[in-house]
């Protein structure tokens, strides 16, 4: 605050203003500031985020520059060849919402994104390509469009593409949250590619069938399932949509579950997948967890705050905290989304507003 001028209320009489300002200037030299000038902003009646609604059209604005990056730098040199999706209301912060980071990552045929680990949790949602892999603590998983892959905090992970087509996915990380806590640690593995110490399919067999090794104690709060394949999610959504009426706000919405405790997939980030039937028009909905949405199937319109966006497969949208969203599905639509709800619920901060529903 030192050297900054506090904005005095325009209602304050001018003699008092001058006196108070002199006082504020004096105490600022000692790193002191008057709470009463900023209390209602600091402790606001409702969320008041600088983040704005936004949409990135994959086909029109993301894919071409990403492929161009593929000609400028290798995945190995970049460590991670990613274009950051930055919220237009948070310039220069590498944040898509106040608490979350998102980017689109490209791994070309024959490339590796070298093994490293960090205290940030990460999730990947596959947009394009078939069969490239991520390895997590020595176990590989092959990635297909619509798969959700997590690389939890402090797990060694590398990505590789042994197929003959480019692989693109959406990265979601809790980077701004970890920065907020000043708790970032990261290190590189000795080799670019970690050795396979467990066969592919080990984790889903062990933890993904409503079974678990009898004496298993989870070592981390993140899910032991690190790939939630779209083939399974899609089938569950189809059954759900056949057997249930859609929720007015969400259509048919599922959350990804950690089988160890029924919680969210990572300790900070929650992930969701929803189906909107053809012609579905949702009622307005808002919640304190800002969402990053990736369109998997379908086309339609989203009204986010006072912005209206059309959407198509692979587009990415952001719904800021406490900003109303309404969906209109022109064709049957599948939406993946992630948010900081896992953290907010633990901190007892999460709220929603179903607009009178
Ligand atoms: O793949 O590990 O988009 O560490 C940003 C930071 C991806 C990753 C990102 C990362 C990664």
Image (tube, helix red, strand yellow):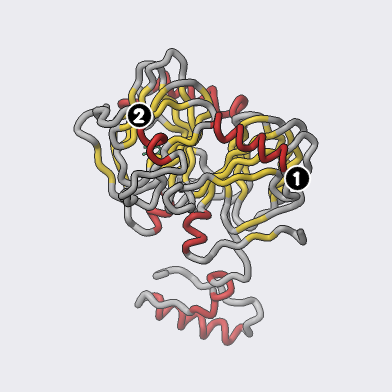
Q: Quadrant of residue 242?
A: top right
- Identify the residue at image location x=60%, y=45%: 254
- Identify the residue at image location x=53%, y=65%: 349
Q: Quadrant of residue 163?
A: top left
**Residue 161: percent from left, percent from top:** 39, 21
Q: Which residue matches tag 2? A: 140
Q: Is mark 2 within 8 Å of ligand 1?
A: no
Instruction: Kindly identify which numbered label has been placed on residue 354.
Output: none
Q: Is residue 260 above or below residue 76?
A: below
Residue in front for this viewpoint, 264 or 46: 264
On the picture, is 154 further left or further right than 165?
Answer: left
Q: Which residue matches tag 1? A: 245
Farthest left residue? 190
Of pointers 2 and 1, the one earlier in the residue sequence: 2
Residue in front for this viewpoint, 260 or 344: 260
**Residue 203: percent from left, percent from top:** 37, 36
**Residue 107: percent from left, percent from top:** 41, 24
Quarter of the image that includes the C terminus? bottom right
Quarter of the image that includes the N terminus? bottom left
Q: Is residue 53 visible?
A: yes
Q: Is mark 1 within 8 Å of ligand 1?
A: no
Q: Is residue 307 visible?
A: no
Under circle 1, the secondary element is loop
Q: Residues within 10 Å of mark 2 (few under 14, many from 20)?
A: many
């Amino acid at each position: 605050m030192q050297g900054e001028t506090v904005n005095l209320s325009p209602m304050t009489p001018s003699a008092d203003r001058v006196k108070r300002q002199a006082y504020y200037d004096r105490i600022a030299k000692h790193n002191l500031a008057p709470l009463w000038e900023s209390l209602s902003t600091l402790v606001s009646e409702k969320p008041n985020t600088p983040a704005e609604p936004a949409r990135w059209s994959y086909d029109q604005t993301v894919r071409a520059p990403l492929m161009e990056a593929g000609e400028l730098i290798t995945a190995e040199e970049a460590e991670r060849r990613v274009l950051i999706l930055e919220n237009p209301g948070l310039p220069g912060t590498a944040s898509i919402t106040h608490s979350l980071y998102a980017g689109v990552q490209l791994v070309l045929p024959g490339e590796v994104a070298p093994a490293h680990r960090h205290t940030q949790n990460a999730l990947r949602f596959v947009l394009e390509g078939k069969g490239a892999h991520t390895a997590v603590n020595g176990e590989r998983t092959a990635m297909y469009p619509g798969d959700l892959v997590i690389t939890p905090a402090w797990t060694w992970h590398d990505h590789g593409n042994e197929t003959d087509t480019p692989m693109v996915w959406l990265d979601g990380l809790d980077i701004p949250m970890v920065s907020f806590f000043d708790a970032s640690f990261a290190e590189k593995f000795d080799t670019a590619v970690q050795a396979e110490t467990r066969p592919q399919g080990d984790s889903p067999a062990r933890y993904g069938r409503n079974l678990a090794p009898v004496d298993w104690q989870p070592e981390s709060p993140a899910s032991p399932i690190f790939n939630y394949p779209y083939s399974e999610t899609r089938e569950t959504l189809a059954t759900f949509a056949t057997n249930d009426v859609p929720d007015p706000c969400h259509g048919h919405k599922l959350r990804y579950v950690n089988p160890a405790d029924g919680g969210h997939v990572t300790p900070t980030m929650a992930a969701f997948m929803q189906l909107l039937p053809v012609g579905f028009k949702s009622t307005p909905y808002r919640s304190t967890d800002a969402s990053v949405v990736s369109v998997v199937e379908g086309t339609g319109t989203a009204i986010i705050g006072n912005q209206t966006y059309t959407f198509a497969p692979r587009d990415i949208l952001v719904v800021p905290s406490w900003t109303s969203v309404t969906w209109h599905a022109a064709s049957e639509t599948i939406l993946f989304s992630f948010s900081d709800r896992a953290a907010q619920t633990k901190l007892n901060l999460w709220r929603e507003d179903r607009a009178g529903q």
